[in-house]
Amino acid sequence: MNISEWNVHLFRLINDAGKEYTYLNPIMIFIAEYMVIFLALSMATIWFTKNRKNKMMVFCGLLAFIFSEMLGSVAAKIHWNTQPFDELEKVNKLISKAVDNSFPSDHTILFFSICMTFWLFYRGWSFLFLVLATSVGVSRIWVGVHYPADVFVGALISMISATLVYLIIPRIRFIRNIIPILEKIEQALMSFLSKLKSKVTRK
């Protein structure tokens, strides 16, 4: 089989599993659609730990995502394919999705750029973030909206971007000086919100 045939074959293997193991479908739908909320809450929680390494990690994760999205846009201009449910027959489509270029997977780019950054900063048990990113990528195939190649390329782009950001950005003095500035803005904002809340409560 050529690469294109393997891509379809692997898609069928994963997507058809949803027809056989239907009890897993709600879990896969949740991961594919709503795990992004967990990621956002995790980033916010980590940022507010008042640990500068954590803040740098979140900052680098966001930069890695931006760079990955830029590279993803370039890849999308080089290659085009619509979602599997639009191109193939009898796809087990479990979520609603507009038809457009599905290459590479934006969800995979988001999760791998952030989760790879988290792992690079702390290693150890933070590999669970990579497990999370992988589960999101697989879930997007399971629910019928991405091919394995969409996910693989998205993950590859993100892991390269996250590694480069990790190796370069924290070593730039200007970037390191941004974190204290952001902390002061954060403190001023929290103080303002606290005073505003007190005024509202007194009324």
Image: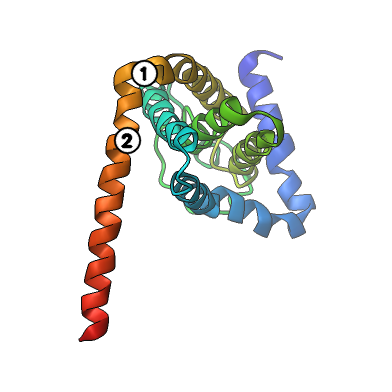
Q: Position of residue 12 (x, y in %)?
A: 69, 36
Question: Residue 179 occupies which quadrant of the picture?
Answer: top left
Badge 2 density bin: few <14, some 14–19, many ≥20, Cα 10 Å: few
Q: Which of 101 and 182 is in front in this view?
A: 182
Badge 2 marks a residue whose secondary structure is helix
Question: Residue 71 occupies which quadrant of the picture?
Answer: top left
- The residue that disc 1 covers is 74
Q: Which of 191 and 83 is in front in this view?
A: 191
Horizontal arrangement in the rendering, residue 25 relative to residue 175 (left or right): right
Amino acid type at mark 1: Val
Amino acid type at mark 2: Pro
- The residue that disc 2 covers is 180
Badge 1 density bin: few <14, some 14–19, many ≥20, Cα 10 Å: few
Question: Residue 1 occupies which quadrant of the picture?
Answer: top right
Q: Where is residue 159 in the image (x, y as percent from the top left)?
A: 54, 22
Q: Nearer the observer, disc 1 or disc 2? A: 2
Q: Quadrant of the C terminus?
A: bottom left
Residue located at (48% from left, 27% from top): 104
Vertical comparison of 78 with 29: above or below: above
Q: Position of residue 180 (x, y in %)?
A: 32, 35
Q: Which of 38 and 97 is in front in this view?
A: 38
Badge 1 marks a residue whose secondary structure is helix
Residue located at (65% from left, 51% from top): 28
Horizontal arrangement in the rendering, residue 78 relative to residue 8 (left or right): left
Comes first in the chain, label 1 or label 2: 1
